[in-house]
Amino acid sequence: MAQVSLRRIVKAYEGDVQAVKGIDLEIADHEFVVLVGPSGCGKSTTLRMIAGLEEITDGEIAIGGTIVNDIPPRDRDIAMVFQNYALYPHMSVYENMAFGLTLRKFPKAEIDKRVKEAARILDITPLLERKPKALSGGQRQRVAMGRAIVRDPKVFLFDEPLSNLDAKLRVQMRTEIKKVHQTVNTTTVYVTHDQVEAMTLADRVVVMNHGVIEQVGPPQELYHNPATRFVAGFIGSPAMNFIPARLEEASGALRLQLPQGIVLDVPEARTARYRQHAGKPVLFGIRPEHLTDDKPTDKTNPAPLSLTPEVIEPMGMETLAHFKLDGAEISARLDPATPASVGAPLRLIAHMDQMHLIDPTTDRVL
Amino acid sequence: MSATTAGRDTPGIYHKAGSLRAERRWALWTAYASLIFAAVIFLAPPFYMLITSLKTSGEIAGMAGNPWLVRDPTLENYWAILGNPLFRQFMLNSIIVTACVVALTMVISILAAFALARMRFWGSQVLATGVFLTYLVPDTLLFIPLYQIVGGLGLLNSIWGLVLVYPTLTVPFCTWIMIGYFASIPKELDEAALIDGASWPQMLLKIFIPVALPGIIAATIFAFTVSWAAFVYPTAFVTTPDNMPLTIGVVSQLVRADTFAWGQIMAGALMAALPPVVIYAFLMDYYIAGLTAGATKG
C-alpha cells in the first residue's frame, strides 16, 4: 500500500550535466506506471533515485507518504528487478528468493511459505534447487521477479527487465508481468525504452525526453492526443508521419497545402481549433494506420492523395508502403490485397479525423 | 576438414588449404620443441635433487658412473632428515609463518580490494594504482630499511618479525588481483543486495567473497607461495636455527663446517618444495582464472 511522489526531482552530475531536470510525478497506490523514452532521457536515473541507488541533487521523493531522500535502499521497502537479472550466482533459486527475507530475519517457516507461493505464481517451482547458470533467460527473469514478490514490498521497480530477452520471450514475459501485477497489485514503476511494452503494461505512461517529462497519461490518451511532437513520434509503431505543410483558409474552411501540390481538407470539427494558425507553416502529423489505400471507408473526412511508393514491405496481415514527399519519409498501412508496386503511383486516403498539427517552432501539438 | 580434403584432390582455389595444414603442423612442432626444451631446463634441477636425495653419501662422493643415475637407491637421507629435530623445527616455523601471513594477507587484501573496487571515495583510483606500484619495489631493496623497523619493534630473530614483513610482498599483489576480480562482478549484484537489505559487511561476506572465490583462491596460492619460498627476509632477519624457516634452515644448518650433507640437503629441499607443488596441482584452474580476471580488469 503505497503511493510514490516525486517533487521537483533534479539529478545533476559533475560538470553540471543534468540528467533529470526537476520532474514532478504522482504515482497512485496499486498503479502500474511506465517511464518510457530514448536512451539518456533520464528514466533509469529517475527509477534509481526512487530506489535510493542514486542520490538526489534536489527535490523530494516520498514513498507511502514518507520522504525517503536520506533513507538507504534497504529501508525504503522496495524491490527491484534489473535488466541483467542480478541473481546471486552462487545461490540456488530458492536461496536467491529467500535472501532478502533471511537478512530481515524472517522465521524459516514464513520464508518457506512466501518463496513457495511466489514460485507457484511464477511457475518456477521445479527450478527452486537450481543455480542461476542452469536457467534460461526467461527463467532467470522470473526468479528475479520472484525475489521481488517474496518481499511483499511497498513498490516494485523494474529497470528494463525484458531488454535481454529475445523478441518472442519478451512478449511472453510482458504478459507474465501484467498477470503478476494483477495478482499482487503492488504499486509498480517500470522503465523501458520500448513503447510497445509501455503501452501494453501501463495504467499510465510517462514519456521522458532530455531529463523532462513530455507527457503523462493512459496509453490511449498518449496515442490519440499527444501533447508534443516528441510524444507523437515516439508512441506508435511505425512512427507518425510528419509532413511540412501550410494551413490556409479559403471561404471559411481550412485546408492543408502539402508539397507537390497536394491539398487536404481539414475537417470542419477542427476548424475552430486551428483557425488562429491559418497562414502559418505547420507540421502535418498522421499515423501510418491513418494513411491507407483508397477504399470505401466508414470513417468520415477521408482526403485522397496520390503518392509513389519507394519501398513495399508485406507483413502478412498488412503491407507497409514507404514514400518520400519533399524530403519527408512517409509510411502508409495498406490492405495486403491492394496491388502496390514500387514506382507505380498509389491512391491513398488520409483519415483527417485522426490528423495532428504541430507548431514547428515550439514542437507542441496544436 | 572438407577444405583440406578438397585441397589434396584439386588444385586451384583450394590450394591454400593444404599450405594452411602444413603451417599448422609446423606451428605444432615448434610449440612442442620449445615446450619440451623449457620443461627439460626447468625440471632438470628438481630431477637432479631427487636423484641425489636417493643416493648414499658414498655414492654422491664417488666420481665413478653417471651422476644422473642412482645405483643403490635408498631412503636413508629422508629418514635422517625427518629424524632431525632441527628440520622439524624449520618445518613448523614455515607452517606457522605461512599460515599467519596467508590469513593476514587475505583479510587485508579482501577488505582493501572491496573498498577500492566498490566504495567510490575520493582518491580511490590513485590508491589502487599506488597499491600496485608498491608491489614493484623488490624485497632486496626493502630489507635494509625494514631491518631498522623490525629491529625497532624488537622482532629481529623472531618468526613474528617475518609474519610482520612478508605481507609487504603479498598484500599489494593480492589486493591487485582482488580489485580486478571484484571489479568484474556486475554492479547490479551489489545494488540488488543493497535493496534486499544487506549492509556493506553482509554484502562482502555473503555476495562478494563467494562469487569471487576463484580470485580469492588465486590470491591465497600466491600469498602461500611467496611466504613459503621467501629467502631474502629470513636471511636478513633471522639468525638462530630455532627461528629459521625451511628455506634458509635447510641450506644453512645442514652444512657441518665444510661438510655438505648433500643427500640430506636435497631430501630436505625436495620436501620443502612439495607443498606448493601439491597446491598448484590441485588448484591450477582457479589460479589461472583468478590471474586472468585481474589482468583484464585491473
Image (cartoon, rainbow, N blue to C red):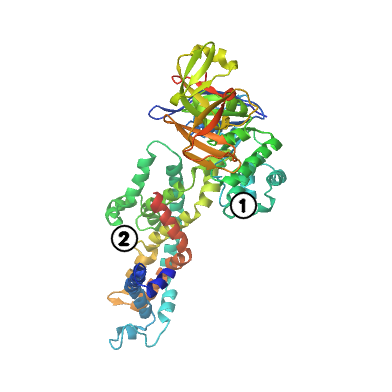
Q: Nearer the viewer, residue A274 or B283?
A: A274
Q: Nearer the viewer, residue A180 or B106?
A: A180
Q: Which picture quadrant has residue A198?
A: top right
Which of the chains bears the disc numbered 1?
A: A
Q: Secondary structure at mark 1?
A: loop
Residue type at mark 2 is Val
Assess disc 1: are there few (<14), some (14-19) or many (≥20) residues with their C-alpha within 10 Å of its C-alpha: some
In the image, taking residue B98 as reference, residue A35 lies left or right, namely right
Work out whether disc 2 and disc 1 sit on a shared chain. no
Residue to which mark 1 is pinned? A92
Would you say residue A336 is visible in this rendering? yes
- Screen quadrant of the N terminus of chain A: top right
Instruction: Quote the CA–CA distance across marks 2 and 1.
Output: 47 Å
Q: Quadrant of residue A185?
A: top right
Which residue is located at x 37 percent, y 80 percent? B51
Q: Nearer the viewer, residue A239 or A50?
A: A239
Q: How many marks?
A: 2
| Residue A349 percent location from the top left of the image | 56, 29
* Lateral position of residue B66 relative to residue A293, left or right: left
Percent x, y of residue B124 = 39, 40
Residue that label 2 marks = B232
Q: Amino acid at mark 1?
A: Ser
> On residue A170, which mark appears?
none
Pointer 2 chain: B
Number of residues whose C-alpha sits closer than 10 Å to that of mark 2, classed few (under 14), some (14–19) or many (20 or more): some
Q: How far across and how far down the image is residue A294, in percent?
A: 58, 31
Q: Residue at x 52, y 37 (%)?
A: A321
Q: Secondary structure at mark 2?
A: helix
Report if residue A54 is visible in the image.
no
Residue lying furthest front:
A344
Task: List x then y, in percent, for residue B8.
Answer: 38, 74
Q: Quadrant of residue B21?
A: bottom left
